[in-house]
Amino acid sequence: MAGRLRRIAIDVTPLRVSRDFRLLWSGSFVSAMGSQFARVGLYVQVFALTGSPAQVGLLGLSGLAGSVAGVFIAGSFIDAHDRRNVLVWTQVGHIAVSGVLVAGALGGHPPLALLHGANCLTWLLASIDNPARQAATPRLVGAALVPQASALNQVLFQTTGIVGPAIAGLLIAATSPTAAYAVDLVSYGGLLIAAIAMSPLPPEPPASGGRPTGLRAVREGFGYVRRDRLIQSTFVIDLIAMIFGMPQALFPILAVEQFHRGTEVVGLLFAAPAVGALLQALAAGPVTRVVRQGEAVVWAVVGWGAAIAAFGAVGPHLGLALVFLAIAGAADVISAIFRSTILQVTVPDALRGRLSSIFMLVVTGGPKLGDLEAGLVAAAVSPTFSVISGGLACIVGAFACAGAYPELRRYRAPQPAAS
């Protein structure tokens, strides 16, 4: 029994064998938990100041603007500098932005422009430090352990995504958004200290010529995506999943119209996919040993779409709906593990930071476009139709992507050299 559990449970070998990965993972955990406090605090504060859901929705727009800007800024220098130093200085920037939020909240009625500006800068900095972390991973653990490291990162992401907002909501209800911003400010110290303690991660020597910076570096990153159809396919299939099959914008409406409940159900709908994703990540032992990783991505997106369509078709049965959302979250985390692994293993180190930055733009931008798609279809037909048709579109889109990109279907994970 114990042996069977070890085969199923997540493989923590990267944490055991790499001191610097332990530092990076633990520091990132503390930082990510604090970021959830700031995210909830912004939503609560903007709604308290305006009483307008539309104003709260604009936080998505300012965040997307920051993400796009961050991709171009990161692309201009991230692969030409020590990635540890990039982490150090982005955490300093995060601390400064959180300090502005704390000061504004202490003032009582900060202008909306300040809140949106801080949100934009937070996502801009995240679009630099997240790719730096992702690009550093293969050098910290080795290519063979990248799937296991990606699974551990998913545990981090899903755990903080569930626990952070729950605790933040309780803290804000008992105090104010000021306390949430203060927690966020302090939490960045965790990753800052971890980054300082890590060994340097200077860029590897270029194969020939100098290392590009500025606009030339940005063009080189996007040019690689344009030429590399395997990487291109991982971006396309994730956009298909998130644009057509991400119905979170409809959760407040479905809570009332489909499940005939109040706002207390909205939180459950948001949490269910993360719960499924966390459980799958914790039991990712067999997943990380899959060799046909490209096919696994395709079938994971098919599973995501089927579960989302089933969620829309269950009618008023809330328990079944939560189960299907959890199944969708489990499928999504499998896709995320392998898409991240394919990028980190196949992209040269000299380009890995820039490609990770574009990857993060796809990951964060897709759901925002999905909110727009879900809302437009719901307004034109109905929320239930929007969910079901979106899930089915995911299935069709996944097979279409697999047909258009045979490189994805054929991809196999590199195997360790025989000793």
Image (cartoon, rainbow, N blue to C red):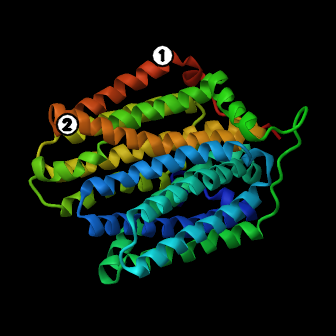
210 left or right of 273? right
- State whether residue 89 is above or below residue 318: below
Task: Choose mark 2 or mark 1, whichever is in front.
Answer: 2
Horizontal and vertical percent position of residue 239: 45, 33
The amino acid on which the numbered mark 2 sits, given as a three-letter code, is Ala
Q: Residue at x 43, y 81 (%)?
A: 106
Q: Which residue in the structure is indicated by mark 1?
A: 403
Horizontal and vertical percent position of residue 290: 57, 37
Image mark count: 2
Residue 378: mark: 2
Chain-order first, disc 2 or disc 1? 2
388 left or right of 399? left
Q: Is residue 415 visible?
A: no
Between 416 and 46, the one lying in front of the other is 46
Q: Residue at x 29, y 39 (%)?
A: 308
The amino acid on which the numbered mark 1 sits, given as a three-letter code, is Gly
Q: Residue at x 43, y 59 (%)?
A: 116
Horizontal and vertical percent position of residue 369: 38, 38
394 left or right of 388? right
CA distance for labels 2 and 1: 29 Å
Secondary element type, mark 1: helix
